[in-house]
Image (spheres, helix red, strand yellow):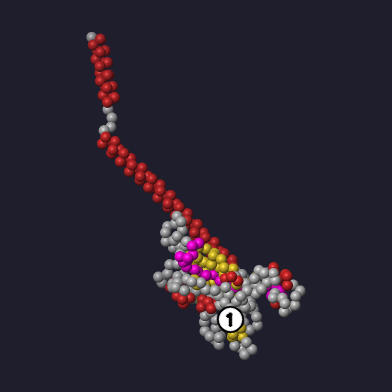
Amino acid sequence: MLLFLEKYKNNFLQLVYQRHKNSGFTLIELLVSSVVGSLVVSALLGLVVNLLETDQQDLVKSRLQQEMQSALDYISEDLKEAVYVYSGECIQGKGTSTDSDFCPGLVNHIPMFDKSVPVLVFWKVDLLPEGCQSTLGLSENNDPCFNSRIANRTFSLVVYYLRQNQASDSLWQGKARITRYVLSQFNSNSPPKQNTGYFNPTQTGTSFRFWPYARNDLGQLVNRQTSTPTSSGATNLTLVDFVDDTPDAENSTTICPNEYVLTPSHKSLEDQGLARVRSFYACVREQQNQQPDVILHLRGNTHGKQGGYGKVAFSNLKTHVLGRGVVDKNPR
């Protein structure tokens, strides 16, 4: 009896082992498992890629906004040294030479570029160039620095342009950029020479507002600029790229506070084919013999930025600047 049970037990275990050895997945089960696994892996990979792209886009957006803020800070520091800032009306031109509020229009007396508009124009004090040391001791007629040496200063005209990037501008990938132009009195030669198109705004018979006009012996305002300055005689550099060029749907968003004048004017933008483009503009407070008072606005756009969102305009950055210098200040 025991022998029979032992034999039955061995046969049963062999049967179970044999059935377990021959068991497995069918082809259909393998295919279904593969498809389900692929879908799960694809979904996970898609999620990871999407997270990486979003992180990259946010990083690009953050860096570009920092670039816009750095540009605005640079302009603000530059503007703090201004002694006179032109409003949009004076940049474009206002009245005639016989009017008390006459402005000759700086667009006729500074370099103009295609699809660009001067947004911020001001005069600032500069030190005499080192080249003036070589003329020290010469007579007034032979020393180009003679008059400026007495005051130990000279004045430079600074212009910030909003320039829409063109197909020929291969170096710039954004929609628009800001360039800085400086017309100083002297070049860097030794001895120095006066730059083309420069006229001293402190000479008798003229003023910063009337520049480059001055009154003659008959009291008439006459243009004293012999020729328009060129970029070859001045500093002309790009400050920042990827500035927005999207026209505003309404002009109500760019209304300046009371006593401030919008710059550039609507006409200046229209003349340059940039109607209602207010990505870079200023509100200038016109107050004679007082410190320059300017509110600046700047807006960037990620269009063309590698790894960015495409064409996405930022919200406006804003700063309020009070200049440190002024000519003939009347204290209150």
Quadrant of the image for the N terminus?
top left
- The residue depicted at 60 percent of the width and 76 percent of the height is 197
In the picture provided, is 139 more to the left or to the right than 1?
right
Q: Position of residue 157 (x, y in %)?
A: 59, 73
Q: Is residue 196 above or below residue 169?
A: below
Which residues, given as a range, are shown in magenta?
148-171
Residue type pointed to by label 1: Phe
Residue pictured at 29% horizontal, 36% vertical: 30
Would residue 34 appear left or right of 313 to someone viewing this image? Answer: left
Please name the residue shown 52% across and 80% down the image: 93
Residue 199 at x, y = what percent? Answer: 62, 78
In which quadrant of the rendered view does residue 182 lie? bottom right
In the rendered structure, does residue 156 fall within the stretch colored magenta? yes
Residue at the right extreme, as displayed: 137
In which quadrant is the C terminus drawn?
Answer: bottom right
Q: Is residue 53 above or below residue 266?
A: above
Residue 219, position in %: x, y?
61, 88
In this view, the residue in front, 141 or 310, is: 141
Whether residue 167 appears in magenta in the rendering, the answer is yes
Q: Residue at x 67, y 69 (%)?
A: 189
For disc 1, the marked residue is 210
Query: Does residue 8 appear left or right of residue 86 in this picture?
Result: left
